[in-house]
Amino acid sequence: MNLQVLVMRRRFKRNDAKRDAGLTVPEDVQRFVDIAYGPDPKWNRLDVYRPKGAEGKLPVIVSVHGGGWFYGDKELYQYYCMSLAQRGFAVVNFSYRLAPEHRFPAALEDTDAVFHWLLDNAETYCLDAKRVFGVGDSAGAQILGLYACACTDAGYAASIPIDPPAGFVPKALALNCGVYHVEPGKRSAIVSAMFGRKPTPEQLDRISVRNHVSAAFPPSFVMTGEGDFLAQAAPPLAERLCALGVPVEYRYYGDAAHRLGHVFHCNLRLEEARRCNDDECAFFKRFC
């Protein structure tokens, strides 16, 4: 086990526990929890959240959690995801297999399995399979971005390989505080954990979202903020999508007097998080 990964897992967990201390399940959210979506009994589990009392099929948000590819699970994202459900969506919150125990493309394979599960079980949970959206933060934004590339480019999907549902493309995405291009030598220990060794140039190309977007990529809300250590990654992706003619909305939250930090939108106590999450859900509703 990579010592850096172990140390960072412990630190991330402490910070997330502090962020969510005292939060409780909202009374206006209905939960379906610990549903199996694949063969791994620990990691292939998901929750579905719906506004309590909502009738009929709802538009769906699938959340891909962050954590540097090596940390996180659905329990750490439940309060954030339930807050999205309170905005009028059904939300699918899932865990996926983590590096270095599970190497690339395990997380993408699990993400693909979740979307297959969603389409297969839409009637059971009153999910509108024609209005499916995705949110991802940090590594989750990269995973979601790569998955959208696979949905819109059969050649890229075959190179991973994964097999997205035939004809399926998310209606729109929110990509938050993500990394979308990986250069040799950057974040080397973490990226090496994904592959079990130092990645080749070909492998770095495969995990760089910017290299594989096309004009068919879903409309995207690309967000970062003051104090995000990945802030420089967002503008080049937004510019690339604009150049391709993809509808894109780029937002930068906070300023020098209001440092928000990485994935601030998951901290439900922040006013800026409320505003960002409102903005993203409003963006999705434009494509419902």
Image (cartoon, rainbow, N blue to C red):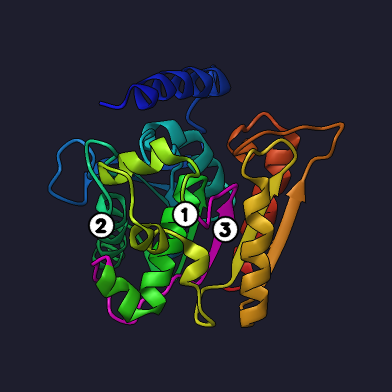
Residue 230: horizontal and vertical position, in percent?
62, 44
Relative horizontal placement of residue 38, taking residue 148 as reference (left or right)? left
Q: Look at the image and give the residue range highlighted in magenta.
A: 160-182
Q: Residue 241 falls in which quadrant of the image?
A: bottom right
Relative horizontal placement of residue 160, taking residue 63 as reference (left or right)? left
First reached walking from the N terminus: tag 2 or tag 1: 2
Q: Residue at x 58, y 37 (%)?
A: 266
Q: Magenta-highlighted stretch: main secondary structure? A: loop
Per the rendering, the mark at residue 174 is: 3
Compute the Cα span from label 2 to label 1: 14 Å
First reached walking from the N terminus: tag 1 or tag 3: 1
Kind of residue at disc 2:
Glu
Kind of residue at disc 1:
Gln
For the C terminus, the quadrant is bottom right
Q: Residue 282 falls in which quadrant of the image?
A: bottom right
Q: Secondary structure at mark 3?
A: strand
Residue 52 in view here: no
